[in-house]
Image (tube, rainbow, N blue to C red):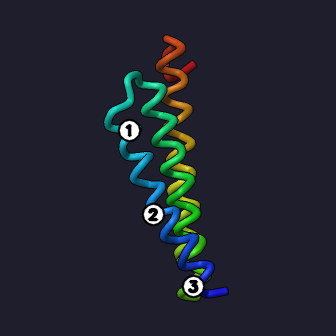
């Protein structure tokens, strides 16, 4: 079980590099934002796996904070791309 978690952890870390490539080389802003969203999801998964492996539950709180900030960023970009003001 522990070996399987390590394999999944390393796979998610490897997938983060693909997301970083999309964030840097993305041809448009929405492509880059999708890369940032997927990167955030992978980081939350990494936090969950690390919490299971190490037994330190506070790492889950870091993942929750990360996903909330990612959601707020996605909403802000959606408003920006729809050409509306942020206070509407």
Q: Which residue is mark 1?
A: 23
| Residue at (38% x, 23% y) in the render | 27
Q: Earlier in the sequence, mark 2 or mark 3?
A: 2
Q: Which residue is mark 3?
A: 53
- Foreground of the two, 42 or 82: 42
Residue 22 placement: quadrant: top left
Q: Which residue occupies the foreground of this view, 81 or 24? A: 24
Q: Position of residue 14 (x, y in %)?
A: 44, 60
Cβ atoms at labels 2 and 3 below 8 Å apart: no
Between 86 and 41, the one nearer to me in the picture? 41
Mark 1 surroundings within 10 Å by alpha-carbon count, few (fewer than 14), some (14 through 19), many (20 or more): many
> Is disc 3 in contact with disc 1, using a CB cutoff of under 8 Å?
no
Alpha carbon separation for disc pair 2 and 3: 15 Å
Mark 1 element type: helix
Image location (x, y in percent) of residue 16: 44, 54
Q: Label 3: few (<14), some or many (≥20) within 10 Å?
A: some
């Amino acid at each position: 079980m522990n070996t399987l978690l390590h394999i999944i952890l390393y796979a998610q870390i490897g997938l983060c590099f693909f997301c970083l490539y999309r964030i840097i080389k993305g041809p448009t802003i929405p492509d880059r934002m999708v890369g940032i969203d997927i990167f955030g999801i992978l980081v939350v998964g990494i936090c969950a796996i690390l919490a299971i492996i190490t037994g330190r539950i506070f790492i889950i709180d870091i993942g929750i904070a990360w996903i909330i900030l990612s959601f707020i960023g996605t909403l802000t970009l959606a408003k920006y791309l729809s050409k509306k003001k942020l206070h509407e």
